[in-house]
Amino acid sequence: MVIPTYNRSEILSETLERLAQQDFVKGGYEVIVVDDGSRDGTQAVLESFAKKNLFPLRFFLQHNQGQGIARNHAVQEAHGKIIVFIGDDILPHRDFLKEHMQFHHQYMRENEAVLGLTLWDSRIPKTPFTEFMTSGGIFFGRFGGHQFAYDRLKGKKMADYNFFYTSNLSMKRSLLLKYPFDDSFHSYGWEDIELGYRLTKEVDLKLYYNPDAIADHYHPMDPESLFGRLKAIGKSAHIIHKKYPELQKVPPFWKKVILGFLTNSFFLHFSKFFMHRFPRTRWHFLYYYLISKKAFLEGIEEGI
């Protein structure tokens, strides 16, 4: 199991506790944590947990270079044939590893991977904002789902590269050694989707969806944090656009003009006013959509 981490020592400790409670063969899995230059005492947390000897735990420190490079480092160090990716704020259920491995026993080819289901942790209040972040078709049947879009997988057995969520995903180590994460991605965004798309093109990736491989996501968010996240994604969009222009991750000029018009201060204030005036309507989703596009456009411009 591979976990990149950066300045989240408190929730990382909880994640490790959950991993120690797995209903799985004792000693049948190892956990590799790569600290991407944390400054919050993460190393002390890892050292303390390793002393408990609850499962094989190894950890490595690197200068802050991004999640993709941290994962590549961990894959190189791993011993197992199956790599399970999670985030440092992902809290697996007891049968999480068992569910992933059951699918790998069924789908054994090198190009076959498994996607699990990630839900909001129960401590995260359910709000229109959290609904927007995890519902891919909440607005006009398309927009939303900036965190996850599992609603689009309901009743489906397989997912495409857009669901290459490295917060809950497993695949063969041999494939990752041949096709590592692109190390040109240093900031947040696109490094996982890029790999998913590359594997789809190169080896016809088969991503099977197992909604019983469940983990909870504890990461409090608000519209301000969404703005920062989408801005970082906008900056990184140029990298993937240069490699795969057919994906049109950087919108063409005409689309940027339209989005720029829709995200000006008038429309933002207009949608925000109606969001507060009519709290039980879909105005929330319009406002969140507009600020997400405004942030993305700013990131696009800064990334040039």
Image (cartoon, rainbow, N blue to C red):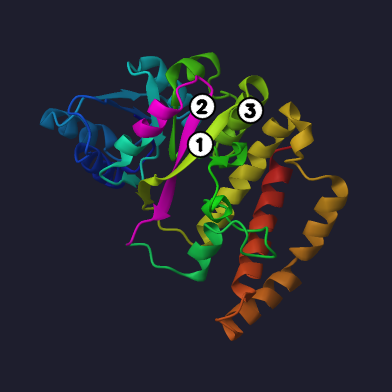
Q: Quadrant of residue 144?
A: bottom right
Q: Of the two numbered discs 2 and 3 on the same chain, state the one appearing first in sequence.
A: 2
Q: Of the two numbered discs 1 and 2 on the same chain, state the one appearing first in sequence.
A: 2
Quadrant of the rendering where the C terminus is positioned: top right
Q: How many marks?
A: 3
Q: Is residue 2 left or right of residue 258?
A: left
Q: Which residue bears the numbered disc 1?
A: 208
Mark 2 residue type = Glu
Residue 243 lies, in percent from the top left, at 72, 27
Q: For the point 26% across and 32% down, which residue is it?
A: 43
Q: Which residue bears the numbered disc 3?
A: 200
**Residue positioned most to the right:** 254
Above or below residue 206? Residue 262 is below
Mark 1 residue type = Tyr
* Gap between marks 2 and 3 measured at Cα: 11 Å
**Could you classify mark 1 by the number of other residues whose Cα lies within 10 Å: few (under 14), some (14-19), or many (20 or more)?**
many
Q: Secondary structure at mark 3?
A: helix
Q: Is residue 165 left or right of residue 136?
A: left
Mark 3 residue type = Thr
Q: Which residues are magenta?
A: 101-122
